[in-house]
Amino acid sequence: MNYFCFKTSILKHEISLLLINSFKQVEILTKPIKQIQNLLIQDKNFIIAAS
């Protein structure tokens, strides 16, 4: 394994870690949005049921 291959593998590893972390952040950000959407859907269903 030469130096260039070594550097490339480290780079690939770091990129994959960055991708995993960004996916986790996206999940953390989208969770509240999904909860709000669910609440809005429940409200809409409640209003429809009440009317």
Image (spheres, rainbow, N blue to C red):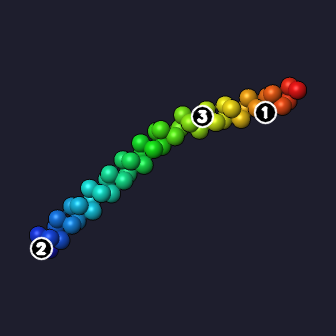
Q: Secondary structure at mark 2?
A: loop
Q: Residue 29 at what x, y percent from top left?
A: 47, 38
Residue hosting label 1: 45
Disc 3 crowd rating (10 Å Cα; few below 14, some 14-19, many 20+) is few
- Tell me whether circle 3 and circle 1 mark residues in contact (CB < 8 Å): no
Residue 3 placement, left or right of 26: left
Indicate which disc residue 2 carries. Answer: 2
Q: Position of residue 31 (x, y in %)?
A: 53, 38
| First of labels 3, 2 by sequence position | 2
Is disc 3 in contact with disc 2, using a CB cutoff of under 8 Å?
Answer: no
Which disc is residue 35 wearing? 3
Q: Quadrant of residue 38?
A: top right
Q: Disc 3 marks which amino acid?
A: Gln
Nearest to the eye among marks 1 and 2: give it. 1
| Residue at x 79%, y 28% (from the top left corner) | 46
Q: Position of residue 17 (x, y in %)?
A: 31, 53
**Rendered image: mark on residue 1:** none
The quadrant where residue 9 appears: bottom left
The quadrant the C terminus occupies is top right
Tell me which residue sits at (36%, 47%) in the image: 21
Q: Amino acid at mark 2?
A: Asn
Give me the C-alpha separation between circle 3 and circle 1: 15 Å
Indicate left or right for 36 with 44 as reference.
left
Could you tell me which residue is drawn at 36 percent across and 53 percent down? 19
Of the image marks 1 and 2, the number of the one nearer the N terminus = 2
* Residue type beneath disc 1: Asn
Vertical side of 14 occupied by 38: above or below? above
